[in-house]
Amino acid sequence: MNTINEIKKYWDKQAETLGTSPLATMPDLYLKELEIENIQKFLFDGAIVADIGCGNGFSTFQYALHNRITIIGIDYSEEMIKQAKKQLLNQNIDCQRNIEFCVGDITKLNLKPEYFDIVITNRCLINLTSLEDQVLAVNEIYKILRPNGLYLMCEDCQQELKNLNLLRYKVELPEIKMRWHNLYIDEEKLFNLTKCLFKRDQTINFSSFYYVASRIINGKIAAEQGETPKYDSDINRIARMISSDTNFGGYGPLKLFALVKIAERERERERERERGKIKSYKSAKSLQKFYYKKHFPNKVIYYQNNLKGGNLL
């Protein structure tokens, strides 16, 4: 099991090596463009936005340049934030006034409660080392969003990676494995454990066609020619041009979830419904313990001792 410090050192090294380049956080620039393009569709003028896991700020600047928003970029890598602040110095005064960067931990956010209209995570949760920490991060995001605020969760998912690998198997290509520093989200488990916090408004499989074209068609042609597939190939370039508007099933691990914060009153009603389903558990705290016994049988005591009031649900 990789530790969070090992992962952080990796990203520090990426920042030191690649500086302000978008390649510091993503080797596939066409896929990065698709990420940014789809997230921007949900931004609106005047919004106060938190971009958590912002890396060197490349995406953060794109959001700010195409929308009149106030945005703060947060990352746990000090080196990434250094690069982001370096870029900020080269921007115009209006841009500098509306963008801020700081070091922070998504599992322990030190931000004003119920302040942000929108929170973005872009391949951030997958750099945590456990489902438990991913749940903690979603709870932290809930706290800083305004009532009915929007959480744009752009993360890689386990099931779509499996689907993609089944197609690769059919054309005799090797399995694509998660990178050593990643833990793709288990969509079913994560949303089950946070369903009292957010309701899913939209799920956008924007990368599905692109992954089939780039990781299967481009990959197979390269293999037959005895070459390593190139991220900047013509096949990838053309696939990027049409991917955003193409509904192509569940083959793209990278998905965008638009989640709306559930109000406290609605959360109480959801708890009541759950109590009706599990009658032997009489209180919200007992219900929480039921979920964590089910999913994390060895972690219940840890959560009770380390979370204020144990309020994960």
Image (cartoon, helix red, strand yellow):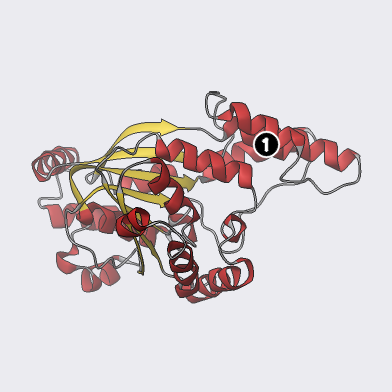
Horizontal side of 14 relative to 124 (left or right) equals right
Quarter of the picture containing the N terminus is bottom right
Above or below for 254 versus 310: above
Residue 261: name its quadrant. Answer: top left
- Left or right of 226? Residue 83 is left
Residue 210: tell me if it is visible.
Answer: yes
Q: Looking at the image, is 245 positioned above or below residue 23?
A: above
Q: Which amino acid lies under the numbered mark 1 shown in the image of this protein?
A: Leu
Who's the residue at 60% across and 26% down the image? Answer: 242
Q: Residue furthest front?
A: 93
User: Of residues 234 and 131, which is closer to you in this image?
Assistant: 234
- Residue carrying label 1: 166
Rendering coords of residue 107 (x, y %): 33, 65
User: Residue drawn at (71%, 47%), measured in percent from left and top?
Assistant: 175
Instruction: Say which quarter of the image contains residue 231.
Output: top right
Of residue 215 and residue 100, the one placed in the foreground of this image is 100
> Residue 221's x, y, as percent?
84, 36
Q: Residue furthest right?
A: 225
Q: Nearer the viewer, residue 125 or 72?
A: 72
Q: Say which residue appears at 31% left-offset and 39% top-offset.
A: 259
The image shows residue 94, relative to residue 152, as above or below, that is: below
- Residue for point 56% across, 62% down: 20
Q: Position of residue 69 (x, y in %)?
A: 30, 46
Residue 158 x %, y %: 53, 46
Judge whether residue 167 can be spotted in this image: no
Q: Quadrant of residue 163?
A: top right
